[in-house]
Image: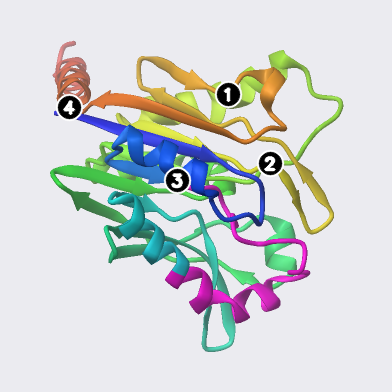
Amino acid sequence: MLIKVVAVQSRMGQKLSLSEKIHIFKERPDFVCLPEYSLMDRSITDYHRAALLYREHLDYLIGLSEELRTCLIAGTVVEPEDDRLYNACYVINRGLVLGRYRKRYPVEGERRKGIAPGDRNLVVEVNGVRVGLMICGDVFFPHLYGELGEEQADVIFVPTTSAYRPEDTVSRKKDRDNTYFQSGSGAAGAYVVKVCSVGRIFDMELHGRSLIAAPWGMLRRVDFTAESNPRILSEILDIAELREFRCKLKRRSEVKSLPGE
């Protein structure tokens, strides 16, 4: 089974332009992923203001999935419930909401400003493909990759915002990509699609280093010279090959655990 995924490295707070939507539509993707907090523009100065726009943002994302005729991994929105706020990612297949994942491990700045942690994973099946979710800082907790692997996720989408670090080197960037995404792909036995924003959120400058990884290696990554620019990555993923790879790893692990081995 071959599927096409599209990672939209967009400018923070901007809806997709007509030309971007046409480009994506022509790709005929099975899945499109947006970045974390992708609709938060500069008029939104805190998470409570973002929560007031929750319904407006979600309606736009539902409409976008219908317009693109695809399954949209809808970046994230600030979702209010009772007296709490959550950083939530919706999976929307051609206008139908299939599920919602709340970030399990908000970073310190989010917690300080009112974002509460979610308490469960999400794996949904879309046309025979098992889709798992993590959000940004969740990748610092590698047991989540293991849990999604146990649930047989085929593709793990990771909407992300990544702070610009002027002192960064290419070597450090590659190390982080390998530690938090390539290694996670191997641990889960799943493809990993990380999708970033460019621009700014609150007072933090961002850079985009979107990527697509397989357990056996990096498939595609935004060039290090283009991290401040919007980009659209697309890749064809072979789900049958992935599942065969996963089965081989499981058999090898079982053989090693036999008595006397």
Q: Is residue 121 above or below residue 175?
A: below
Closer to the observer: label 1 or label 4? Answer: 1
Q: Residue furthest bottom?
A: 82
Mark positioned earlier in the residue sequence (1 or 4) = 1
Mark positioned earlier in the residue sequence (3 or 1) = 3
Q: Which residue is mark 4?
A: 243
Taking the spot 76% from the left edge, 68% from the top edge, the residue there is 43
Disc 4 and disc 3: Cα gap in Å?
Answer: 31 Å
Disc 2 and disc 1: Cα gap in Å?
Answer: 12 Å
Quarter that holds the C terminus: top left
Mark positioned earlier in the residue sequence (2 or 1) = 2
Name the side, left or right, on which 42 lies relative to 70.
right
Which residue is more in the foreground, 143 or 231?
Answer: 231
Three-letter residue code for mark 3: Lys
Q: Which residue is mark 3?
A: 21
Taking the spot 57% from the left edge, 46% from the top edge, the residue there is 136
Q: Position of residue 134 (x, y in %)?
A: 45, 48
Q: Which residues are magenta?
A: 34-59
SS class, disc 4? helix
Disc 3 and disc 2: Cα gap in Å?
Answer: 18 Å
Q: Is residue 50 above or below residue 163?
A: below
Closer to the observer: label 3 or label 1? Answer: 3
Three-letter residue code for mark 1: Val
Residue 232 appears in the picture as rendered: yes
Q: Which residue is mark 2?
A: 198
Q: Which residue is mark 1?
A: 222
Q: Is residue 156 above or below residue 180?
A: below
Which residue is more in the foreground, 195 or 253?
Answer: 195
Which residue is more in the foreground, 63 or 212?
Answer: 63
Closer to the observer: label 4 or label 2? Answer: 2
Taking the spot 16% from the left edge, 17% from the top edge, the residue there is 248
SS class, disc 3? helix
